[in-house]
Amino acid sequence: MKPTILSQFVVALVAAALVFGAFRLMNTPSKSVIIEHVDKSQAKSAVYTLDENGAPVPLDFTGVAQKSLGAVVHIINTQGVSKAKMSRGRDEDFFRQFFQQGDPRQQGPSIGSGSGVIINPDGYIVTNNHVVKNAEDLEVTLNDNRKYKAKLIGTDPQTDVAIIKIEEKNLPSLKFSNSDDVKIGQWVLAIGNPFNLNSTVTAGIVSAKGRNIDLFDPSVGGIESFIQTDAAINPGNSGGALVDLNGNLIGINTAIASQTGSYNGYGFAVPANLAGRVAADLIQFGTTQRGYLGVTVADIDSRSIEQKDLKINEGAYIASVRDNSAAQKAGIKAEDVVTAINDRKVSSRADLMEIVGSHRIGDKLNIKINRKGDFKVFEVTLKTLDNSIAANAKPDAVEDLLGADLKSLDPATAKNMGIEGGVQVVNVRPGLLAQNEIEEGFIITRINRKPVSKPNEALALLKANPDGSFVEGYYPGSDEKITYNVEPK
């Protein structure tokens, strides 16, 4: 049967529509497009980007992969059974899944592996705190298979960032970039060593920013404002690099959201601005010089907008302000809503925590707030956690380094526990005890085998051994004696 004039017209119309659609697709102003190639019996899809003239060119990850691979290392953490058993905290199981941790019940050394990124040609490597914690031995393998013993320089449990160092020069390295420039939807590569598969590269996009996933134990006071990506991240990627298509280091891969412990579409990285500042402090001072506002902050939701009669639906709500804090001195009050810091928009509690957490003691911030519908700007000079403005220098007093207060154990509690006495750890904050996994409530009974029952006795023994001390004690409600090797990180 010959085609009718009507059917010929329909075919021609459809063909014209397809040609026009292909023309529109190839000339779209977006950065990447999908172009269908029909190859006889099968269709092949390829992702394209646009060159400087707006012409589509195939999206190629090989250049950035080659540029970045040499700076990403494989880290092996070996620790004894006793130290493996000491690892405590509600995030332990989560981290054991992401960081390839051996079974702590096994008889023999516990061996785990993770990743790291060389950020200085002289051998400084950034990784995660949970990758290197409790390590008795750290071995680093470079992309070219050279192996080195590594030294721990410093850790920051609040951001899960750590610095280690190997003795070598002229190493390939990556520089931290400005993670504020990262855009949702942009292409990124995750580089690391998942499942001990060295030098693995996966691709995806940035699927969210400023993500808070309640990863840290509340006693640590963690700073969470993660970059979320759908680039495949698995156990062993922890501490590896998240880079953009120019090879810029935009984040340090830290966690995954998964019910199985393996990739399920969501990975999280500490943004470069935060990780970079922490890394610089750890290299220079051995500890962080983080500044504090002295406020408690909450997110804004429809319920709080109605209950508190807020005149704004985005920002970080100031629930309370500490006396003599940096915020109070500047004039910030409870029920204010922070909307911007140094002209950077603040949409959530996570945004505020990231921005403030990436600044040092003594830094000045211009904080824009909404107060019952009126906008005001305050200049705030960040203070220490105890509301002092200290010089950016490594503290040498044991009281400062501990990051906690000590109080004598009351006689009734000591009698119930069947011990003669001790001192209890309270008000844990970032410092030596938190870095060594000692939690709130721990009761110290002996330091270097000498009994202690008063805070000044404990401090004197710790001062007498600045390179480290063996601290023995118990957690309330447990008769298991635990010994920590408390030493500067």
Image (cartoon, rainbow, N blue to C red):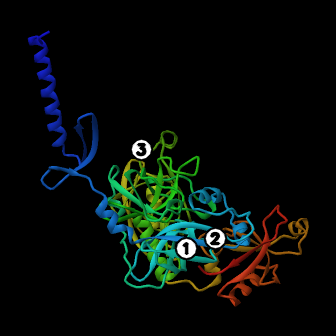
- Closest to the observer, 358 or 229: 229
**Which residue lies under the disc numbered 2?**
434
C-alpha span from label 1 to label 3: 36 Å
Q: Are marks 2 and 1 in contact (CB under 8 Å)?
A: no
Q: Is residue 98 left or right of residue 462?
A: left
What is the three-letter code of the residue carrying label 2? Ala
**Which residue lies under the disc numbered 1?**
155
Q: Is residue 444 left or right of residue 149?
A: right
C-alpha span from label 2 to label 3: 36 Å
Q: Is residue 59 left or right of residue 354?
A: left
- Closest to the observer, 134 or 364: 134
| Residue 461, placed above or below residue 180 | below
- Closest to the observer, 355 or 231: 231
- Among numbered discs 2 and 3, the one appearing first in the sequence: 3
* Element at label 3: loop
Q: Which quadrant is the C terminus positioned in?
A: bottom right
Q: Residue at x 67, y 84 (%)?
A: 468
